[in-house]
Amino acid sequence: QKRERFQRHRNELARYYQKSLAETTYTLPPHVPERPSIFLRYPIQHPRAEQVLEQAKARQIFLGDWYRTPIAPLHVDYQAIHYSPCPTAEQVAKETLNLPTDIHTSLEDAARIVTFLKSSSL
């Protein structure tokens, strides 16, 4: 029951983010009704994601910086795992930031995040 409640909450926030950020410069995950997702985090992209994260932190708004590298965790020995840099993966990771969907993030918190993202000076 707890898992179902958490999933409903994550889906509610994801729908809110999807609707609220649809007409912005952020790239959102595709919405495919026949393949529903449960977002552990809601990943969005912006060419200046690093600056968005910095501005959010300065305003005490929590945005995640997970998946900012193609291979996680940071400081993995790329030679040891035979990683060949992929320009596309590197660029996507650099532009990714994550919006929270956890049970402790209220709809009001999400609204504050959306307001920040829409009014960001980037």
Image (cartoon, rainbow, N blue to C red):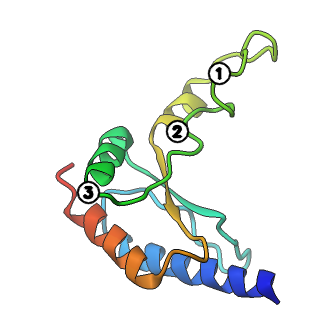
The first of marks 2 and 3 along the sequence is 3
Q: Residues within 10 Å of mark 3 (few under 14, many from 20)?
A: few
The first of marks 3 and 1 along the sequence is 3
The first of marks 2 and 1 along the sequence is 1
Kindly indicate whether the residue at mark 1 contacts the one at mark 3 (C-beta within 8 angstroms): no
Q: Residue 92: give its label.
A: 2
Q: Is residue 49 left or right of residue 65?
A: left
Q: Position of residue 59 (x, y in %)?
A: 26, 57
Q: Secondary structure at mark 1?
A: loop
Q: Secondary structure at mark 3?
A: loop
Q: Which residue lies under the disc numbered 1?
A: 75
Residue that appears at 81% across and 17% down: 81
Q: Is residue 77 left or right of residue 29?
A: right
Q: Position of residue 100 (x, y in %)?
A: 52, 65
Q: Amino acid at mark 2?
A: Val
Q: Which residue lies under the disc numbered 3?
A: 59
In the displayed structure, 46 sits above or below 37; it is: above
Q: Is residue 66 left or right of residue 24?
A: right
Kindly indicate whether the residue at mark 1 contacts the one at mark 2 (C-beta within 8 angstroms): no
Residue that appears at 32% across and 41% down: 48
Q: Between residues 12 and 54, which one lies in front from this camera angle?
A: 54
Kindly indicate whether the residue at mark 3 contacts the one at mark 2 (C-beta within 8 angstroms): no
Quarter residue 40 falls in: bottom right
Q: Position of residue 93 (x, y in %)?
A: 54, 37
Question: Mark 2 and mark 3: span between their CA atoms?
Answer: 25 Å
Quadrant of the image containing the N terminus:
bottom right
Residue that appears at 31% across and 53% down: 56
Question: Mark 2 and mark 1: span between their CA atoms?
Answer: 18 Å
In the displayed structure, 18 sits above or below 50; it is: below
